[in-house]
Amino acid sequence: MTGHGAAPVRKPLLTPGVLLLLGLVALGMVFAWVRFASGLGAVTHLDDRFPWGIWIAIDVATGVALSAGGFTTAALVHIFHRRRYEALTRSALLTAVLGYTFVAFGIVMDLGRYYNIWHPALPSMWSGHSALFEVAMCVMAYLTVLYIELMPIVVERFAGRVRLPGPLGLLDGVVEGALRFFDRTLGRVMSVFIVLGVVLSTLHQSSLGTLMVLAPSKMNPLWWTPILPLLFLLSAIAVGFAMVVFESLIAARVFGRAPEMELLTPLSRVIPVLLFVYLAFKVGDVMIRGVVTRLGDGSAASLIFLLEIGLGVVIPLLMLLSERVRRRPGLLFAAAAMVVLGVAFNRINVFLTAFTPLYATRRYVPSVGEVAITVAFISGLLLLYRVLVSVLPVLPAEEQPQQQRTGSRHVHAAPPSSIGRWSA
């Protein structure tokens, strides 16, 4: 890798992996069509006692947490001025954009009356006493901010090169004018959107925990706590950096690129510190509330709780304290993957494992349709990431021989842009 800026990935698009993802998306779309045509009951195992399942626990709660790399890297680079990590911000931003986009799809899929999803945007339906209302407003606002932050990358790629096919060519001037408008205006206010994105993220990451604070009688005491919003925020910040490392190493492996260890190694030093802070609050919470004795009762809940903390927090924390682990791509990937899976496990435990309705007569088990649609969402996210990094300058440009760089400079070089410095 070099510091020559970002460039689209020049790799074949239709690979066996891409075809597999397309097949999984197609299968999920079949179940999605049945869901919208015949209702939730035709596809899911949800009912009045179990109003949510894996679509909320995985597609929404976990999706929001694992998209935290967008606001953590934005804060690191643009607020704390750690400019050396600018090369990682574009891929983190794209991951956040796709993550929150599919979170929105997941909410639409889960809502019984999905056609009313626009209601939180109507002032007459606002409720200042609703935690879910705050989450809805912050997610809508943050998703808008993310697309605005992505716009400089689009301008860099297409400004001066708009060539729409066929009759759409009549709109070339309009699209070119819009790109130039964004180029002139966004650079002046992008810092405002970056700060706004960080603030909105801290609000709704914590408020997702607030939702479950409202149900103390329906949750296992090991997971229910009045500081659940704080725990959600701390774990999101920790997994944000771990997700950047995780995604960067996967992209390097998939595209046959050298891993950016000169950036990932120093970035990974902050992860154990954040994990330690989260662990301290987690352990202190169960001790102060007097539920620590439940960890030794041999119940399934206690074993799951210990597994979540042990594999998702303690082991990767100890691994990342080692300089040897941080400098070796394989070991660093394993540690980052454990953090990512640990936070995902935590969200599933909070929303599913710990949740038991008062008058439940059965346990919730996801249906085949629910699993298929969730797999389709994940596959669709990976597929769009693969397509977009092939079209947009997201990943750092690969080093080429000098004569090749000279001969192809007109392909990769970006046109002069007043907002390019904010999109790095």
Image (spheres, rainbow, N blue to C red):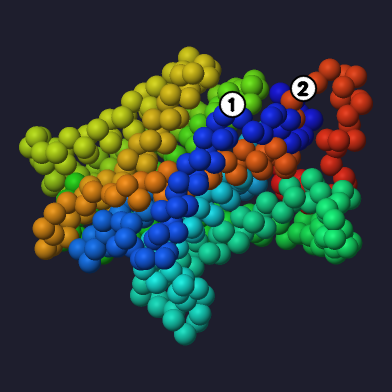
Q: Quadrant of the C terminus?
A: top right
Local SS, label 1: helix
Local SS, label 2: loop
- Up-down: is 146 above or below 135? above
* Residue 399, label in figure: 2
Q: Residue at x 83, y 35 (%)?
A: 412
Left or right, 2 with reference to 288: right
Left or right, 46 with reference to 65: left
Instruction: Using a 10 Å C-alpha cutoff, classify the residue at mark 1 as few (fewer than 14 neighbours), some (14 to 19) or many (20 or more).
Output: few
Image coords of residue 140 (percent x, y)? 53, 64
Q: Quadrant of the N terminus?
A: top right
Left or right, 341 with reference to 359: right
Q: How many marks?
A: 2
In this rendering, which labeled residue sits more in front, label 1 or label 2? 1
Image coords of residue 383 (percent x, y)? 57, 41
Query: What residue type is disc 1 on?
Result: Val
Instruction: Using a 10 Å C-alpha cutoff, classify the residue at mark 2 as few (fewer than 14 neighbours), some (14 to 19) or many (20 or more).
Output: few
**First in sequence: mark 1 or mark 2?**
1
Residue that carries the numbered disc 1 in the rendered image: 254
- Up-down: is 113 above or below 201? below
Would residue 80 be seen by someone viewing this image from the given angle?
A: no
Inter-mark Cα distance, 1 to 2: 17 Å
- Up-down: is 73 above or below 104? above
Query: What residue type is disc 2 on?
Result: Glu
- Residue 172 figure quarter: bottom right
